[in-house]
Image (cartoon, rainbow, N blue to C red):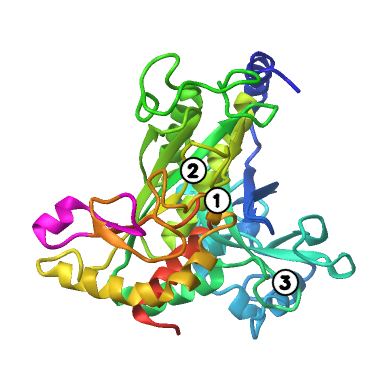
Amino acid sequence: MATREVLSSRTETVNKYMKLDQKGKIMAEYVWVDAVGETRSKSRSVTGASAAPRGPGWRPGKPSPAATHGARLLGFATAEGFLAGRACAEARLAKNGTPHGPTTLPEQEYKPEDLPVWNFDGSSTDQAPGENSDVYLRPCAVYPDPFRGSPNIIVLAECWSADGVPNKTNFRHDCAKVMEAYADHEPWFGLEQEYTFLDHDDRPFGWPSGGFPAPQGPYYCGVGSGKVVLRDVVESHYKACLYAGVNISGTNAEVMPGQWEFQVGPCEGIQMGDQLWIARFFLARVAEDFGVKVSWHPKPIRGDWNGQGLHSNFSTKEMRVEGGMKHIEDALKKLEPHHVECIKEYGEDNDQRLTGRHETGSIEQFTYGVANRGTSIRIPRETAAKGYGYFEDRRPASNADPYRVTKILMTSIFGQL
């Protein structure tokens, strides 16, 4: 496998090609979540508003055969429904040029509905059987591309099966319905994503070969050689998120050497899951450029070493104003009977992490306390002092799906739809 030095040289080489003129085309990289909770991606070229599905016999106002077919596949009653929301794109096209000209839309104007539904081989990602392998990518969020630069875009997409229903791995669809139903509560989320860098032998990066580093203590928020590694990767990821408009709010080195954290939020409703998944994708891509791996496993190293979670900070508009503590306490009372149900949604192998040690509560019971990181739920001391604010659910594992985490929080507190 290539060394970091070789990869750096290759990056310098590819940069000269990235500066070439794209002749009016936009490179759109579609990103989705696969069957094991990893991101996948593939790229295509689009040209402004003409990205709407068209085929033989297309004319303005008439759905193409491709649009009609796509509408039926994705459960829309008509092709007009499939193309709903694209009127603004057509209007911009009519104003700025013809479908045959070089007109393109600036990436900041792109909306998911401007972009075509695409597909991939679901049998290669364990998302569909081989005899019916097409899985459809339905755009749901668009971001400026920090790797290829303007005017190129990153497209987060939902997975839909050929029978017009959400794919078994599509947890966004139901989450979005819950967020819409309870939008009046203005739910805010902030997720703290912990992760560990690995070398090519799947050991934490920077650990001595065949041995272990000094015990935990100097590494958390550490500064200096011997305390932290790969800060260059962390900073590059931070900048990539900022460029793309992800609401990344910070980073820090974590308790175990080679372990880091970034925070995304506050985000309202479905945007929390969207932005966290894109931030994960960006980290995987940046780490790829530097020739290192990223582990999302909640306990990457057994023994007296910290695991890693996806601590979930949560509040509603009722909790954020004077008297909000009562609403926080009411929410915790509603969460307690759903503890087992929540754990099922909070990631794989979480039992290896939630042991009651290493700043975790026990997986067996629901607990909460003020400023206590050994509980299921931590109430920040500032929140307790002011009498309003937010609480932190410390149970979710680092590999948890943010759509599942945010949805179960909402339904546990406000009820199932």
Residue type of the residue flagged with mark 2: Gly
Q: Name the residue located 45 percent from the left edge and 34 percent from the top edge.
A: 260
Q: Name the residue located 36 percent from the left edge and 20 percent from the top edge.
A: 223
- Marks 1,2: beta carbons within 8 A: yes
Q: Name the residue located 46 percent from the left edge and 57 percent from the top edge.
A: 396
Seen in the image, is 221 located left or right of residue 330?
A: right
Graded by Cα atoms within 10 Å as few (under 14), some (14 to 19) or many (20 or more), the crowding at tag 2 reads many
Q: Quadrant of the N terminus?
A: top right
Residue 299 colored magenta?
no
Residue 399 percent coordinates (x, y): 55, 51
Q: Secondary structure at mark 2?
A: loop
Q: Earlier in the sequence, mark 2 or mark 3?
A: 3
Residue type of the residue flagged with mark 3: Ser
Q: Which residue is mark 1?
A: 352
Q: Is residue 253 above or below residue 326?
A: above
Q: CA distance from mark 1 to mark 2?
A: 8 Å
Where residue 33 sits, quadrant-wise, is bottom right
Any mark on residue 307, and which? 2
Please state which of residues 258 and 359 is positioned toward the viewer in this rendering.
359
Residue 129 percent coordinates (x, y): 84, 67
Q: Which residue is mark 3?
A: 161
Front disc: 1 or 2:
1
Query: Does residue 147 show up?
Result: no
Residue type of the residue flagged with mark 1: Gln
Q: Earlier in the sequence, mark 1 or mark 2?
A: 2
Any mark on residue 176, and which? none
Q: Is residue 334 above or below residue 12?
A: below
Q: Secondary structure at mark 1?
A: helix
Q: Earlier in the sequence, mark 1 or mark 3?
A: 3
